[in-house]
Image (cartoon, helix red, strand yellow):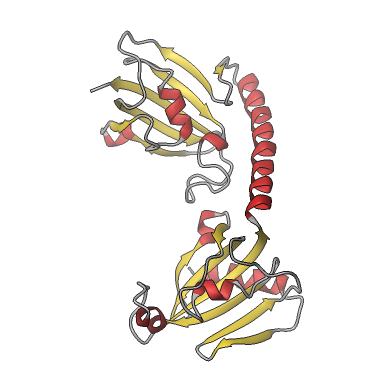
Amino acid sequence: MRYLILYLLLKFIVFQTNAFAQTDIKPELKLNFYNDIKGPKGVEGDIISLHIQTFINEDSLFLSTYDALAPVDITLDKPKFEGSFMSFLYNLSKGDSASFIIPVDSYRVHNIPSIGDSGTNIKYIVQVYDINNPTDFKIKKESKIDKRFSDEMSILKKYFRKNKLKPQKTASGLHYIIHKKGNGARAQLTKKVRVHYSGKTLYGNEFDSSYKRDQPFGFILGLNMVIPGWEEALLLMSVGDKATVYIPSKLGYGLKGNGEAIPPNSILEFEIELLEIP
């Protein structure tokens, strides 16, 4: 934890180009700017992209979006009450880094669940990366996805050439190799399947394996219970098939990733065995 806090403080030194400023929003809430950019602030409906560190009683780190590597996107809604987390966000511009403190009891007075005990404070430290209206947000996101997809196709092409692999490719960018062909029924939408699998990032370590748990995984196809790449791959398989599947990030965990094990924009490689369709 102390390394996370040290890292955060170093980030603040880097971004602290303006004099430290303090603005009173409400008597119980102080907004402290580490970097105060004089730009347009968000309005209701805008999407603000930022990193958030949450501390209980100002010094005990409870949650950090830095652990997930990617900023979070929050739609600006009408604040539940003055001095709330949402009302604070309306005071920020792109490039700002700031902190603010909210008493836990401020939430409880308004019957809103919160972390921490009565009488304690919650401190938030944020760094704003961007603020966009919904249309611009969608355009920028799609542009990032398209650029990343093109890069990933090049990465996979080099990977296959280096490892002398000749997978089949679908229109979505999914690549797969059927190592063993079964003679069972074909997987179908709305049908339950049971599989064994292991997964890793393309150049990384294994992050999950049903084989090691000795526990097959069951789910219903078509209900978004798994990532899109899995849905597509299983629909290409029959009971008894064993395959290696290479999933581009847009069919996996995308720009956000999934914790430390799966960073943002990760190409995933899965070994999948379709055991049965119960």
Q: Residue at x 34, y 76 (%)?
A: 111
* Lateral position of residue 12 relative to residue 271, left or right: right
- Up the image or down, 96 lies above or below 245; here it is below
* Lateral position of residue 205 relative to residue 71, left or right: left
Viewer-nearest residue: 217 or 40 = 40
Viewer-nearest residue: 16 or 202 = 16
- Identify the residue at the far bottom of this view: 27
Q: Residue at x 58, y 71 (%)?
A: 89
Residue 48 in sight here? no
- Specify the quadrant that holds the C terminus: top left
Q: Which residue is drawn at 56% across and 40% down?
A: 266
- Identify the residue at the far top of this view: 183
- Up the image or down, 102 lies above or below 196; here it is below
* Lateral position of residue 18 relative to residue 126, left or right: right
Would you identify the image quadrant in which residue 119 lies? bottom left
Image spot of residue 146 (x, y percent): 67, 37
Viewer-nearest residue: 266 or 219 = 219
Image spot of residue 134 (x, y percent): 62, 53
Q: Residue at x 71, y 71 (%)?
A: 15
Residue 40 in sight here? yes
Q: How many marks?
A: 0
Viewer-nearest residue: 89 or 35 = 89
Image spot of residue 235 (x, y percent): 41, 21
Image spot of residue 128 (x, y percent): 64, 65
- Up the image or down, 28 lies above or below 43; here it is below
* Lateral position of residue 155 relative to residue 278, left or right: right
